[in-house]
Image (cartoon, rainbow, N blue to C red):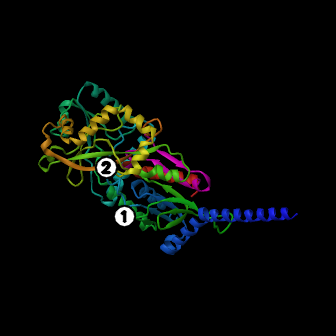
Amino acid sequence: MTVFRKFTAKFHVVDHRTKSNMFALLTKRILLPQLICAYRCRSTSSAESCGAFDLVIVGGGIVGCATAREMLIRHPNLKMAIVEKENALAMHQTGHNSGVVHAGIYYKPGSMKAKLCVEGLKLSYEYFCKHDIPHNKVGKLIVAQNKDQIKKLDDLYDRGIKNNVPDLQLVGKDCISKYEAKCQGEKALWSPWTGIVDWAVVCKYFANEFQKMGGKVYLNYEVTGFSEMTESKGKEELSPILVQSKDKCIPTKYVLTCAGLHSDRLAVMTGCDLSPRIVPFRGEYLLLSDSKRHLCTTNIYPVPDPRFPFLGVHFTPRVNGEIWLGPNAVLAFAREGYRWRDINIRDCIEMAKFPGLYKLCFRYFIPGCKEMIKSIFYPLAVRDLQKFIPEVSFRDVKRGPAGVRAQALDNNGNLVDDFVFDGGKGSIGGRVMHCRNAPSPAATSAMAIAKFIADKLETDFKL
C-alpha cells in the first residue's frame, strides 16, 4: 500500500509538471504573441488607426493604390488602409519601369491581359486628362528588319485587330520615315495610341484620392505575418485579422495583398502553396546623349521573338525629355537588386532551392548568357539599336536606370503569363486574397485590374 501511494504521488507530480509545461508552451506560442500584438496596437497606434478596418491592402504600388481607390469609390463607408514597407509609395516596379502606356497588341486574343490592357488604356488617358497629369501620346513603331520578321509582324497586326487595339495600321518600308525620320526597316506596325507617362506620379494621384475619401496610408510598415485575435464581441462577428509588422499591428476583417516582388512570401504566410515563385529579373536601360535625342520622337520596338519572354531592346522617350534604350533581362541576385552588386543572401538561397529556375536557365541558357555579356559590356547592346537608327553609336550612350521585374515561375520553369489570385487556408486564409501575379502591362491596365479585383472582393468577401 505504501509503495502504491508513493507511486501515485510520483505520478501526480509528473502529471502536474506536464500540465505546467503544456500551459507554458501554449502561452509562449499562442497567447503571448497575441498579447504582445494587442499591446502594440494599443501603445503604438492611435485609436483611429487601430480600430478594426474593413479591408487592409498590403502593397503601395500602382495595383494596390488603384484598387484601394476603386473600392472606396464603390463603398465610401468602408474603413480601409494601405500598408507599404518603404518610406514612400511606388518605390519598386511602379517607379522603375519604362513609363510606356501600352495599347494591347502583343497579348493572346480573348485573354484577361488583352481585355484589361485595352480597357485600361482608355481609362488611363481619361484619368490623365481629368487630373492634368503630364503625358504624351507619342505612338509606337514595331519594326521588322527581314522577311521572317515581316511574317511575325503581320501576325501581330492580326492579333492587335482581334484585341480591338485602336487605329492600328501597317506601314510600308518607304513610309516608316513619316513616323520616325531616322528609323529604318522593311515594314512596321504603327500604334498611335501608345504613349508615355510617369506611372509613379499616377500611383500617387490614386493614393491621394484614396486618402481624401477617408482611406489611411501607413508607410514603413513591413508585414511580417498574419494572425487572428481570439477575442470577439459576439459569436456572429469575425475575429479581426492582425496584420503584423515588427513593432506594430493593424486589425482588419479582410486583407488584399498586392506585394509584387514579395507576393509569394506573403501568400505562404496564410498557408498558400509556394508556387508560383517570384524570380527577380533586372532590366537595365541605357541613356541616349542629349545631342542625339532628336533622333527619336516615338517608341521604337523590335518584332518580339515568341521563343523568349521579353520584348527586346527598344527606344523609349520619357516625359522628362530623356530617351531610354533597353531594357535587357538578366537574373538579379536580390528581389530589389537594381545593381550587380546588390546581393541578398536569403533571396539567393531561395532561388538556389527552386527547381523551376534551373529548368528556365537550361531552356534559355544561350540567350541568357548573351544578355549577361551585353549587361557587362553595354556598347554591345548598341548594335541592336543601330538596326533601327544607324546614327546611334556607342559614344552616344551611357548607363541609365534599372528596374526589377517580378517574374512568376511554376515548378516546371514555365513563365506564368496571366493573373494569379490565391487564398490561404483556415479562418485567416479564407479572408485574405493574394494578387500573386499581375504581369506586364500591369501599370497600363491598373484601373481595369482594380475594377476586376473590386468585383472579386465583393463576391468573395461579400463587401
The N terminus lies in quadrant: bottom right
Does residue 431 show up magenta in the picture?
A: yes
Disc 1: CA contacts within 10 A as few (<14), some (14-19) or many (>=20): few
* Residue 428, quarter of picture: bottom right
Three-letter residue code for mark 1: Asn
Look at mark 1 in the image and give the residue it sits on. 87
Residue 256, how many percent across, how many down? Answer: 50, 56
**What kind of element bears circle 2?**
strand
Magenta-colored span: 417-443
Is 142 on the left or on the right of 363, as rendered? Answer: left
**What kind of element bears circle 1?**
loop
- Residue 119 marker: none
Farthest top residue? Answer: 147
The answer to whether residue 77 shows anywhere in this view is no
Q: Identify the residue shown where x is 57% and y is 53%.
A: 429
The C terminus lies in quadrant: bottom right
Does residue 184 show up magenta in the picture?
A: no
Q: Identify the residue shown where x is 14% and y is 50%.
A: 290
Residue 324, how many percent across, how many down? Answer: 23, 47
Q: Closer to the camera, 33 or 312?
A: 33
Residue 182, how many percent across, how many down? Answer: 15, 38
The answer to whether residue 358 shows anywhere in this view is yes
Is 23 on the left or on the right of 446, as rendered? Answer: right
Disc 2: CA contacts within 10 A as few (<14), some (14-19) or many (>=20): many
- Determine the CA span between mark 2 and mark 1: 18 Å
Q: Closer to the camera, 142 or 21?
A: 21
* Residue 38, quarter of picture: bottom right
Look at mark 2 in the image and give the residue it sits on. 403
Is 348 on the left or on the right of 248, as rendered? Answer: left
